[in-house]
Image: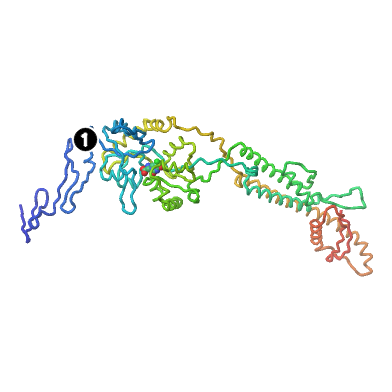
Amino acid sequence: MEVRLTEALQVEWKGLTGPIQFKEGKRVQFKLDLIKLKQHSIVKVGEWTPHGHLNITEPSMFFDSGSMNVTLVVITILETPYVMMHYGKNFTGNERFYGFCVDILETISHEVGFDYILDLVPDRKYGAKDPESGEWNGMVAQLMKYKADLAVGSMTITYARESVIDFTKPFMNLGISILFKVPSSEPTRLFSFMNPLAIEIWIYVLIAYFLVSFCIYVVGKLSPIEWKYIHPCDLENISIGNQFTLSDSFWFTIGTLMQQSTDIYPRAMSTRIISSIWGFFSLIIVASYTANLAAFLTTERMINPIENAEDLASQTEISYGTLDSGSTMTFFRDSMIETYKKMWRSMDNKKTTAFTSSYEDGIKRVNQGNYAYLMESTMLDYIVQRDCNLTQIGGLLDTKGYGIATPKGSPWRDKISLAILELQEKGDIQMLYDKWWKNTDETCTRRSTSKHSKANALGLESIGGVFVVLMAGIFVAAVVAFFEFWFHFRHLHKATSLKTSVNNDSIQGVMAETEWRYTPPTRCFWIEIFEELRYASWCMNKQKRPELNRVCSECKIPQRQTYI
Ligand code: CWD
């Protein structure tokens, strides 16, 4: 053995377990293994060093009983129907407790093989971390301090908790939802008949009515077929009139909309197109209105001021809150979603009123009105099945599960997780759920929900297409009217040109003396068309249509023609 003695009373040599050093008479640089005797072996469970002191590397070894006759300390919290309590002298120890979670615990204890002492958590809290001090409270703190082996109840598995304690596999899945008072039914109003269509549809129908009436008036004016002789037998009196006067156009469209016929019958292709499209439009609007009116009359409409969390966040009239120091509260506190952040700010500002110490307080406040309670859906289901004045609003804001909590590294976690999976697969947990949620006499009978109106005012998204069809129809009719006008005018122009040239021969004979020569029309056509359009748009109906007395400066022909 080689022993080296250095200055300052230091000695160092290599032993069987490695280097051995002494400094100033004390041993330095060494490590002690902490071992545990198991049934068949010795297991290293930690180590001790002069600097780091004790470091337990296998904490689970300290929990492993190795025997079946172990009694675990289980803490819980009262929460109907998970854990409830019998009060009175007749009930002592575990007998005091009953409920869904108590049944699960009992079943698991038989499966896994342990006894337990069930007791309530002293501060009656599930457990939340104080953001300032970093301290935990409730059942989580009890487990962290190893004051209990298990925490059983409606304990939500969360990320923050999972970092300080362990959870088994979830035995129930849930999410946060909104508990609110059942909305009152809407009072009947004098103008309820307007409800089937949204207000913007009424406005658009009115606009469409004016537009179509005006279009039919203009198209009627343009279309030559709509002009007819007022006195067809009086050859001396060549008066022509148009059946689509402004007032008649309005009368014709309202008649069609009201599904009544009028004595005006469109004769031109263009006016027929526009009339058919308006007829189709009227049919759809009237049919939709009638069908939706029936739905509105046969169902009871409910006034629901809020429909989801966004509605809650965007108003200030209805206050809302959660259970204090629970996972619902921490969900809003830690959320990164803008709506939930906003809700948290609102709740945090009204700390004293927003948070309740028990969910019963929350329900009481909801029943008083103007308050929404954000709570876990499983509990919410239980409540709404029993209190017909309360209802769930919207869906779930998140999804999570309830698990049984253990201290970090507890050997019971995996065993209980296995037992939970087995109970789930066998359907035992579902049976327990039915027992505590459904098979009781406390459930209330709700009025048939089919009576509650699902009828909504028809909006642009439902019948907006018919307006598009109408616009397309007006466009087509306008194009057709233009062609009708064009072809008729060309025909007319040709006829008058022919007549003029015949006349010109004789005029030229007369004019030859005055040395005037007729020049064939060039820009005359466009001036004529302009004149004709002006006549069509300004001519008041049932007036004697003036004979065209166009003195066309371009053509230099004094014309006096009768427009037939
Ligand atoms: N908890 C909660 O935060 N909200 C609720 O509505 C109910 Cl019923 C309970 C507590 C939660 N389960 C937790 O573990 O913190």
**Residue 260 shows in the view:** yes
Label count reads: 1
Q: Is residue 245 above or below residue 362?
A: below
Residue 466 or 347: which is nearer the viewer? 347
Could you tell me which residue is drawn at 61 percent across and 38 percent down?
295
Is residue 225 shown to the viewer in this render?
A: no
Q: In the image, residue 410 lies at what x, y percent?
A: 26, 41
Instruction: Estimate the x, y position of residue 435 in percent, counting from the top left.
Output: 40, 30
The residue closer to the viewer here, 172 or 513, is: 172
Quarter occupied by residue 143: top left
Amino acid at the residue labelled 1:
Gly
Q: How is the image coloured?
A: rainbow
Decide if residue 247 is on the left or right side of residue 199: right
The one nearer the camera, 390 or 149, is: 390
Is the C-beta of the residue carrying label 1 under 8 Å from the nearest atom of ligand 1? no
Q: Nearer the viewer, residue 29 or 95?
A: 95
Q: Quadrant of residue 285?
A: top right
Residue 11, percent across and down?
A: 7, 56
At x 70%, y 48%, the residue is: 473
**Image height of 27 relative to 261, above or below:** below
Tell me if mark 1 has few (under 14), some (14-19) or many (20+) residues whose alpha carbon lies within 10 angstroms of its own. Answer: few
- Indicate the quadrant where residue 9 lies: bottom left
Reading the image, the residue beneath label 1 is 66
Q: Position of residue 168 (x, y in %)?
A: 32, 39
User: Which quarter of the frame holds ligand 1?
Assistant: top left
Disc 1 is placed on an element classified as loop
Left or right relative to 15: residue 118: right
